[in-house]
């Protein structure tokens, strides 16, 4: 299909000329995704760790809820966030609708369950391995929690990567709460949706290639980190 | 401090794993727990250390029930040691820090003592079985425990590793650390034991001085076990 | 991780504080946005009035609902009846004529319904229905969708009887519907601007144009501060005033896509 070569050329041209609009959109994409990822990790990693190592009545139910929430459709999240942030909604007074913050909130809701559920799984395995030793040593719970996160850091990196992947590639939620406003809330995915709707399929695909390139770059970086960790063999 | 075990019982899934077990263990020397597989040796040791809680009965350390400050004076070396995903030295440092020992030189000293100093910066999970077990012992010893438990810690090890571990056990025992050890190795038991507790079906069948136990066991079960004939 | 989060958060807040008070939010339709009209007008408005205009482009139905939720300062859409209702319900004080263009029926070169070159929209619609040629409808409660439904009525056709068969409602915006039409060889109704700007035309052509029924009128309304106290009335009115000013009207008239005029100013 000739559209591939056309799109590759367009993608290359956009990048080579470091097109201003593209750079702005790219920067916002990364900013929004990284901010939501950072906030999700601040909430999700400790929560995942607590679910992994503590037993309490609602624990299994909560794990089930977070597992289910990994599959939340982005449009539903977008709609819920829209309804809450709308001027006529309960948080309308914050004036956040159609801002990057609204997009961060929506993406946080999307990726926090991923961070919680996957980190819980990773840390549960480690806990199974460490718990008798830590119990025997009388390690305080807080120290144990930290040790789990430190010793599982390379597995957790993969978890975080999964969250980033979801955030940066998601369009359904951010287009509703961000509004795809030029120079304000337009990100890579909403730009792709826009170009597709304008019938500029080659340009849309070119943007898709660029998004893919970013994903590949981030993944290779993590692969490399893990490989060097293996060389030092913190396995 | 002497340990007084007062008729403890532990049942799991309708199986009575420890059955009305009472004994007094002196505060010095090396006590060895023996018995066929499934006799409840490891579980009994876990009860002594507080990793398992008996359904009934009591375990008193110098007339006091087990509490965190008593547990902190104890160390347990597991049959399959848990190795932190860190270097050998970092494994030791983590344990040392739990007991407020911050000087890395002390950790280095223990590594030398267990012939691990050349591996200090190696990832601990890539050590051989014998090296891992020596690391586990180093981690146990650095806390300077008054009571050291070992749960079949030398099974599957080569003679050199076993010797290193036994030499260390004898030397810490001489310096006043109480050692309680589970083993199937009759030779090891003969080399180390001051007294022997023989368990069978969760019951304490016999508790006697080592010399008596190996020369002239009182119970038929212990005689059969030593002759290699006792099956569960 | 924490530092990264803080950096990211502060960047975000810096980005949003840059959009200070001199900005307004316009709820508008995809047709005006996809054609590039706003890209042409907004820089002029910014330099003349200092106001940054942020445009959310959705269907007319969604735009009106968003505005009724107070999520917008100005509404700029093309569905006369619903605009009048918006004003009558008190959501705006009045409606301003801004511009017009027209709708067209587009279709594949093969023209299975045989309507190419027709000037009579009612008979063309009837031919599409009787030949059961595929027709791609917006089906999204937009202004274009409303116009299309009224055209079926004029042609005296119950198009919903063919729903899922020859009558296919995409439930999407104009661009997506055009992509769908081109993809399945269907006829569709589009505003002229969207069709002209659409990049993925295949062998499709304009089949029907020029009927008076196809007139497409755009109106602007300032959302009432009585209904929505957060509305930036001053800046919103300034935006509308600019559009209906001599300068704004001539700017709309000079906007060209592929050398063609797409919007015709008609403010009083």
Image (spheres, rainbow, N blue to C red):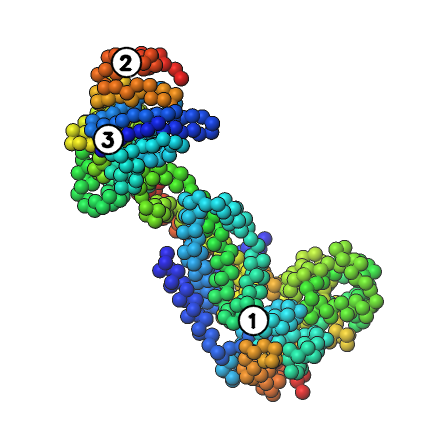
Per the image, the residue denoted by label 3 is: B2
Per the image, the residue denoted by label 1 is: A87
What residue appears at the point 79 percent right and 58 percent down from the top-left corner? Answer: C162
CB within 8 Å, label 2 to label 3: no
CB within 8 Å, label 1 to label 2: no
Q: Residues within 10 Å of mark 2 (few under 14, many from 20)?
A: many
Q: CA distance from mark 2 to mark 3?
A: 24 Å
Q: Is label 3 in a helix, a strand or a loop?
A: loop
Chain where mark 1 sits: A
Q: CA distance from mark 1 to mark 2?
A: 87 Å
> In what quadrant of the picture does the C terminus of chain A appear?
top left
- Residue C85 lies left or right of residue B76; in this view the side is right
Per the image, the residue denoted by label 2 is: B217
Q: Is label 2 in a helix, a strand or a loop?
A: loop
Chain where mark 3 sits: B
Question: Can see residue C264?
Answer: no
Q: Residues within 10 Å of mark 1 (few under 14, many from 20)?
A: many
CB within 8 Å, label 3 to label 1: no
What residue appears at the point 51 percent right and 56 percent down from the top-left corner? Answer: A110
Q: Could you say which is closer to the camera, residue C216 or residue A162?
A: A162
Q: Position of residue B219 (x, y in %)?
A: 32, 14
- Residue A225 lies left or right of residue C259; in this view the side is left
């Amino acid at each position: 299909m000739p559209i591939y070569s056309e799109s590759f050329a367009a993608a290359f041209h956009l990048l080579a000329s470091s097109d201003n609009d593209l750079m702005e959109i790219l920067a916002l994409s990364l900013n929004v995704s990284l901010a939501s990822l950072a906030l999700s990790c601040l909430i999700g990693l400790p929560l995942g760790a607590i679910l992994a190592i503590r037993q309490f009545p609602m624990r299994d139910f909560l794990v089930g809820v977070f597992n289910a929430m990994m599959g939340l459709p982005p449009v539903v999240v977008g709609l819920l966030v829209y309804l809450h942030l709308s001027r006529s909604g309960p948080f309308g007074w914050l004036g956040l609708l159609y801002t990057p913050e609204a997009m961060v909130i929506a993406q946080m809701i999307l990726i926090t369950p991923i961070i919680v559920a996957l980190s819980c799984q990773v840390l549960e395995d480690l806990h199974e391995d460490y718990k008798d030793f830590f119990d025997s040593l009388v390690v305080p719970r807080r120290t144990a929690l930290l040790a789990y996160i430190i010793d599982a850091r390379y597995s957790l990196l993969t978890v975080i990567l999964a969250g980033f992947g979801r955030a940066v590639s998601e369009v359904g939620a951010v287009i509703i709460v961000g509004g795809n406003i030029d120079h304000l809330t337009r990100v890579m995915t909403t730009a792709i949706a826009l170009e597709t709707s304008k019938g500029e399929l080659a340009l849309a695909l070119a943007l898709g290639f660029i998004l893919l390139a970013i994903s590949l770059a981030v993944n290779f970086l993590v692969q490399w980190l893990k490989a060097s960790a293996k060389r030092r063999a913190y396995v | 401090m002497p340990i007084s075990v007062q008729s403890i019982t532990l049942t799991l899934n309708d199986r009575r794993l420890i059955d009305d077990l009472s004994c007094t263990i002196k505060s010095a020397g090396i006590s060895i727990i023996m018995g066929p597989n499934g006799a409840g040796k490891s579980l009994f040791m876990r009860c002594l250390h507080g990793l398992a809680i008996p359904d009934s009965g009591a375990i008193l350390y110098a007339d006091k029930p087990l509490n965190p400050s008593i547990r902190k004076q104890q160390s347990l070396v597991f049959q399959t040691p848990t190795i932190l995903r860190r270097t050998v030295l970092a494994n030791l440092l983590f344990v040392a820090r739990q007991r407020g020992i911050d000087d890395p030189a002390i950790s280095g000293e223990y590594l030398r003592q267990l012939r691990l100093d050349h591996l200090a910066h190696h990832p601990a999970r890539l050590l051989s079985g014998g090296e891992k077990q020596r690391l586990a012992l180093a981690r146990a010893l650095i806390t300077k425990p008054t009571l050291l438990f070992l749960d079949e810690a030398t099974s599957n090890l080569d003679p050199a590793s076993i010797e290193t571990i036994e030499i260390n056990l004898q030397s810490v025992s001489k310096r006043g650390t109480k050692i309680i050890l589970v083993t199937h190795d009759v030779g090891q038991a003969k080399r180390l034991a001051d007294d022997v507790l023989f368990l069978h079906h969760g019951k304490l069948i016999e508790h006697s001085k080592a010399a008596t136990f190996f020369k002239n066991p009182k119970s038929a079960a212990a005689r059969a076990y030593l002759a290699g004939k006792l099956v569960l | 991780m924490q530092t990264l989060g803080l950096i990211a958060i502060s960047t975000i807040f810096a980005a949003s504080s840059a959009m200070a008070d001199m900005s307004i939010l316009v709820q508008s339709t995809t047709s005006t946005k996809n054609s590039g009209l706003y890209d042409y007008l907004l820089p002029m408005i910014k330099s003349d009035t200092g106001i940054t205009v942020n445009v959310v482009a959705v269907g007319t139905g969604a735009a009106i609902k968003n505005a009724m939720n107070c999520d917008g300062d100005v509404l700029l859409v093309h569905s006369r009846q619903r605009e009048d209702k918006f004003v009558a319900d008190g959501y705006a004080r009045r409606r301003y004529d801004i511009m017009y263009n027209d709708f067209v029926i587009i279709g594949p070169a093969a023209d299975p319904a045989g309507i190419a070159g027709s000037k009579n929209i009612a008979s063309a619609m009837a031919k599409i229905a009787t030949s059961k040629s595929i027709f791609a409808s917006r089906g999204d409660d937009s202004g274009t969708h409303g116009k299309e439904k009224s055209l079926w009525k004029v042609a005296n056709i119950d198009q919903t009887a063919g729903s899922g068969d020859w009558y296919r409602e995409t439930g999407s915006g104009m661009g997506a519907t055009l992509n769908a039409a081109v993809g399945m060889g269907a006829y569709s109704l589009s505003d002229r601007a969207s069709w002209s700007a659409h990049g993925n035309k295949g062998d499709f052509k304009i089949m029907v144009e020029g009927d008076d029924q196809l007139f497409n009128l755009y109106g602007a309304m300032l959302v009432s501060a009585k209904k929505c106290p957060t509305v930036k009335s001053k800046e919103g009115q300034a935006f509308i005033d600019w559009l209906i000013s001599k300068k704004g009207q001539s700017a709309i008239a000079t906007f060209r896509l592929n050398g063609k005029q797409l919007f015709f100013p008609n403010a009083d």
